[in-house]
Image (tube, rainbow, N blue to C red):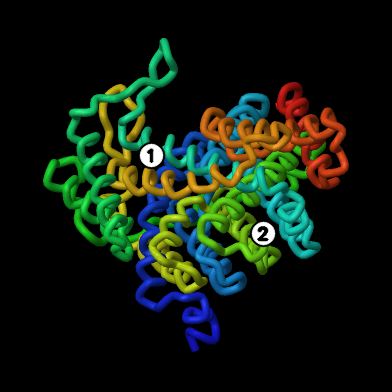
Amino acid sequence: MMEKLFGIQAKGSTIPTEIIAGAATFMTMSYIIFVQPIILSGAGMNLEAVFVATCLASAAATLVMGLVANYPIALAPAMGHNVLFVIIATTVAAQGAAGEPAWPRVLGAVFIAGCVFMVLSLFRFRARLVDAIPESLKNAIAVGIGLLITLVGLEYAGLVVDSESTLVFIGDILSPHVLLVLGGTLFIAILLIYRVKGAILWGILATALGGLLLGIVKYEGLVAAPPSLAPTLFRLDIGGALTVDFLVVIFVFLFLDLFDTVGTLIGVSERGGLMVEGRLPRIGRAFFSDAFGTVFGALLGTSTVTSYVESTAGINAGGRTGLANVVTAALFLLALFFVPLVRMVGGAYILEGQLPLYPVIAPALLIVGVFMMAGVRKIDWDDYTEAVPAFFTLIIMPFAFSIAEGIGFGFVTYSLLKLAAGRGKEVRPFVYACAGVFIILIVLRRFFL
């Protein structure tokens, strides 16, 4: 039955490999179930309810992706989108009636954007968009995502810290948490050299054990009862979001989710060898699964759900089918009951005066960043109409901390340079359209948000 449902052998995988891959993906993205509640609580949402909503939405969306699209690409609330959610909610709250929370309206906007996504997926709009993206930009997107993951890993490790004079600076390399991350990264690299299956998963577990011995990771027990979902369940205000002043908000969520999803699917699929002749089979189903996650998550009480670049960890552990997603989804559900155990792996290490660190997760993110660099050699660096847009795409992502911004800059510069070179016919209409939309979005964000 497993073979009929997932085609495991046909894709060159095995059930044990898929299980390891699903666990590896979960380990690398488990931080979101703790980070998400902390961020959304800044908008006045109940922290414990958001925790439950995040686990359930991630599990449901990941399961749908695995069963419907048969891809090992897990989903969860998007980093960056959650921060935007809080910014909009606090801005609207400041302009509205005193004491009236704004987050239900923003949640309603997320829900509407998800519904529009679902309709677009049925009409293959997003599939056409992926097909229209030039190969140079596809590869640049993958590399840019890798650089973004690397930056996150360096921040989580404490290897890169903020600086007033230079924005960023090297951290204390001899501090225990940095040494733990470096040791974990080298351990994973050695396992990869010897082609050990599940190298990333074993590296995470070894890093967690080292963290326990160093006192960086705290043992907090194994089992805890899941909190109540009631404070956020069905609390979205759809009517409040269907107003003229909120149309821009809906458009922003829609546009960002579109670009983030396309970018992530391309990057992860390119690295995992899931593409066939430059295209991703069953991409409409993958997009539908992504849209479902956003709609379902908004109903439960969490921000935009999207495909996760950390899925590359599972793919590099050997995952090739939706069975890996079934495992990841099951672990998200188990996380509801094993909160202390999950916190040990994805929990934050707090140092005074610094952002929260995640030293157990950091080695996996750094190694995933290495994996994602492969596409840089496929870019035609001798053709500046291809090289310059690719450069903007891959460099803006980490420096602006946004996949969507990187893709937008790539589309705009690609369109302009092709026109300037008298080669405008090489550009697909979708690329021109998205470049125009990106420019419009910049104007709207500048004057209306």
How far is the residue under mark 1 from the one under mark 2? 29 Å
Q: Quadrant of residue 289?
A: bottom right
Quadrant showing the C terminus: top right
Q: Is residue 115 above or below residue 45?
A: below
175 vs 88, left or right, is left
Residue pointed to by mark 1: 153
Residue at image coords 40%, 78%: 15
The amino acid sitting under disc 2 is: Gly
Residue pointed to by mark 2: 278
Outermost residue toward the left in this view: 213
- Numbered circles on residues, count: 2
- Residue 276 image point, x, y percent: 64, 65
Q: Is residue 223 above or below residue 47?
A: below
Disc nearer the start of the sequence (1/2): 1
In terms of depth relative to the viewer, which is nearer, 383 or 107?
383
In terms of depth relative to the viewer, which is nearer, 328 or 283?
283
Residue at image coords 79%, 37%: 437
- Residue 39 image point, x, y percent: 47, 38
